[in-house]
Image (cartoon, rainbow, N blue to C red):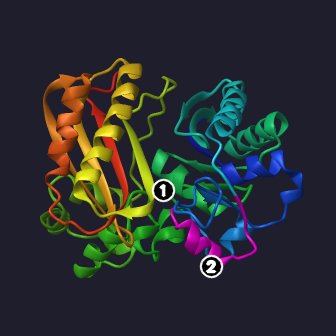
Amino acid sequence: MTRWLLHVDLDQFIAAVEVLRKPELRGLPVVVGGDGDPAKRGVVETASYEARAFGVQSGLPLRTAARRCPDCVFLPVDRPAYEAVSDEVMTALRSLGAVTEVMGWDEAFVAVDTEDPEAFARQIQQRIKSATQLDSTVGIGENRLQAKIATGFGKPAGIYRLTRQTWYQVLGEQPPSALWGIGAKSAGKLAELGITTVAALASADVDAVAARFGPTTGPWLVLTARGIGSDEVSAEPYVPRSRSREVTFQQDVTDWDQVRAEVLKIAGQVTADVLAEERPAARIVVKVRYRPFFTSTHGVPLGRPSSEQHVIEQAALEALGKFTDRRPVRLLGVRAEFADVEP
């Protein structure tokens, strides 16, 4: 028997849940984000495939989404509903008896010993469909990297296998940004080195890439381009590495004293989350999004791990003090990173 890793991804999960709740929306461009009012500030949480055809993507400001797709149906985020359906999905996955690692509401890795991974993938899709009426895509690989990327080729509602034998045939001429974990900024830096394809990155001099990206990230980039990744899957419950809160203001905040007051308020909410986790924070990070949409972050380590509100608040203010730009603020966030991630 051969050990395979399968990446299971629910298709347009949040939008699909909303369509199940409101069948009259089927086939319409649906956008979920904020409180569902595109006239207010907020970002797209997810968009149906019909909305994506208009260029509406996750993270896009709701107002921009409305301009691109005036006929889109906008709905508010309902996290409890998505969490409830996600629980049903993961329960269905685990019922197949394979090691299952949950990665979020709508995705998981599954490790299985089989000579027919496509048949097992079809079982997964059928089990999820039967339990929730939701469609899913399954990527198959020899490691997590291959399986994750394969999912993109299988969407929507398909199955796709990617292995070391087919890696370069499928990805060799693709840009490095086609790889899991390599974004536009890294791809731009690679282009400065003359590396514009996955194949070129795979054959690049490791020392040269490390000189540009550092001794850890550089070699990782080359290994990723070669299709080499972890094949570990853990059934242990997911343990968050941090807890965060943020708020988008309907009117830009221009008074920095008010910004400080808002950061303290958010830090208090984060403290409650840290206390609920019963794990102390080791680092506090503040996020500021200026008008129109430029985002920056600063963080400070705590002298010792703590769950005390005054310690977290003081650290948040210290992190805020690192911001020198006083442009109008449209969003503030505070994140508490935990000291350790224990299973």
How far across and how far down the image is residue 118, in percent?
71, 46
Residue at numbered disc 1: 164
Label pair 2/1, CB-CB below 8 angstroms: no
> Looking at the image, which residue is at 55% across and 34% down?
102
Q: Position of residue 318 (x, y in %)?
A: 14, 44
Residue 117 appears at what percent x and percent y? Answer: 67, 43
- The reply to whether residue 1 is visible in this rendering is no
The residue wearing badge 2 is 67
**Residue in front for this viewpoint, 199 or 144:** 144
Q: Quadrant of the C terminus?
A: top left
Residue drawn at x 75%, y 67% is 29
Compare residues 309 and 33 and report the one nearer the observer. 309
Residue 124: % across, % down: 73, 38
Reply yes or no: does residue 73 show up in magenta: yes
Pick the residue in front: 233 or 15: 15
Residue range highlighted in magenta? 59-74
Q: CA distance from mark 2 to mark 1?
A: 43 Å
Q: Is residue 261 left or right of residue 140?
A: left
Residue 314: tell me if it is visible: yes
- Judged from the image, the secondary structure of the residue bearing numbered disc 2 is helix
- Where residue 274 sits, quadrant-wise, is top left
Q: Is residue 38 above or below residue 238?
A: below
- Residue extending farthest to the top is 278
Q: Return the residue nearer the eye: 44 or 312.
A: 312
The residue under the point 61% across, 76% down is: 55
Residue kind at label 1, given as amino acid type: Arg
